Image: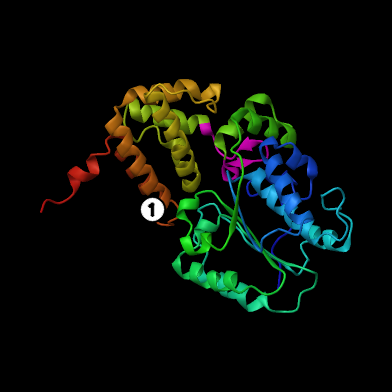
Amino acid sequence: MATDLQDQPIAGLPELRLVSDPATIQGAGWLNEGWAQLDRMIEGGRLPHGLLLHGQLGAPMTALVETLARRLICHAPEQGWPCGSCPACRQADQGTFPDLHRLADDAEHRDIPVDAIRALIDGAFLTRYGRMRLVLIERIERLNRSSGNALLKLLEEPPESMQFLCTVEQVDRLLPTIRSRLQRLRLREPRPDEQASWWRQVTGCTAEQAELLAFLDDPILVEGSEPTFDWLAVTEAWVQLAEGAGSPLAALAPWLATPRPVLARWLLRLWPAVARQRVALPDPALPGALETPVTRLAAAHGSEHWLAVQTRLIQFAREAGHPLHPELSVEHLALDLVDPRLARRLEPVG
C-alpha cells in the first residue's frame, strides 16, 4: 500500500517540523496525560485496533498522532519515544514507509469519499512490510454515510495487525456505528495560556503573536508564526459594516483580498467572542488587540441580529469553496450582515 504520510509541516505551518519530536509533545502540557495513557496501553499490549483521539484539533494534536504512529513502527523505541534512527523511522521520515496510510483533513473539512475507503480496503490484505499496518484518519467525523458504511466493514473484520489511529473534534457528528467500533481517549482541552506558551516554544514568536495564535486555534489560518491574512483589517471592516460607517461595500477591500475559506473561518471564530461580550462573559482567549473591535461589534446590534448573523456565517462557510462569483458572494455576505432580514424580505411572496 502506498503511503502519503511524510515528514511534512503541519497544514499552514511550513516552518514547523513536529513529527517525532518529544519536546513538542512534552511542551503541550494538556496532552501529557493522554500520551502517558497511550504509552501504558502500548507497553501493556492493550492498544485497541481502533483508537479514537477526541480533543481539540490543530498542530499539537497532529504532532501527537504522528509521533504515536512512529512510536508504533519504531524498531527500538527509546524511553517510550521513536528512536528516529532505525530503518522504519528513517523510512517514515522520508515518506517511504509502505505500511502507513493517511486520510488527511483539508481546509474545507470536505467529506472523506467512499473511493478513498475502497482504496484502503483494496490494499488492506496485501503483504505487510513491517509488523503493523497503520491507518491515520484525521477528523473522522468527515465520513459520510457511504464512506462510513464502507469503513465499518473493515473495522469489524480488520486484517491482522492493522491499527487505526483516528482524531475527532465533534464526536456527535461521527456515525454511531463507527463510534461503537472505536475506543475513545478523551484529551484535556488546553487553556489559552498553555496554547500561547506552546506556540512560543515551537515557533519562537513574540508573546503578542502567540496570544493571537492561541485565539486563532486553527492551523489553516496560520503560516509560520504569522496569520496568513490581515486579521486586523478584516476585523475592522466588519466593525465598519456593523456600525454603518459609509456604504456597506466601501470597507470590503480586506475581505476581497482574503481567500473566502479563510475569511469564513475567521468571522466564525470572532462570532463566539462577540456573543460572550454581549452577555458580559469573560473570554480568556481574546487577545488584547481584539478587545476594542469585539466590544464595538457587540454594541452595534441586538441579540436577535447576532443569532441571525451566525446562521448567515455558517451558510457562507459552506459555500466558500465554490469557484463561481467570489466577489459577488462576499458583497452579498456584507449586505446580509448589515441586515440579516434582507434576504427574507426579498423572497417572493406565496
Q: Nearer the viewer, residue 87 or 237?
A: 87
Q: Nearer the viewer, residue 270 or 120?
A: 120
Is residue 134 among the parts visible in the rendering? yes
Is residue 245 among the parts visible in the rendering? no
Q: Is residue 215 left or right of residue 248?
A: right
Q: Is residue 15 left or right of residue 278?
A: right
Q: Nearer the viewer, residue 230 or 91?
A: 91
- Which region is colored magenta? 218-231
Residue 339 on image: x %, y %: 27, 35
Residue 309 on image: x %, y %: 33, 38
Q: Residue at x 54, y 23 (%)?
A: 289
In the picture, residue 332 is in which quadrant? top left
Q: Residue at x 50, y 25 (%)?
A: 290
Q: Give yes or no for residue 224 being in the magenta stretch.
A: yes
- How many circles with numbers are drawn on the protein? 1
Q: Is residue 347 left or right of residue 56?
A: left
Label 1 amino acid? Answer: His
Q: Nearer the viewer, residue 254 or 121?
A: 121
Residue 304 on image: x %, y %: 27, 33
Colour option used: rainbow
- The residue indicated by pointer 1 is 325
Residue 173 on image: x %, y %: 46, 54
Q: Is residue 117 left or right of residue 174?
A: right
Instruction: Establish if 225 lies above or below 119.
Output: above
Q: Residue at x 30, y 27 (%)?
A: 301
Label 1 crowd bin: few (<14), some (14–19), many (20+), radius 10 Å: few
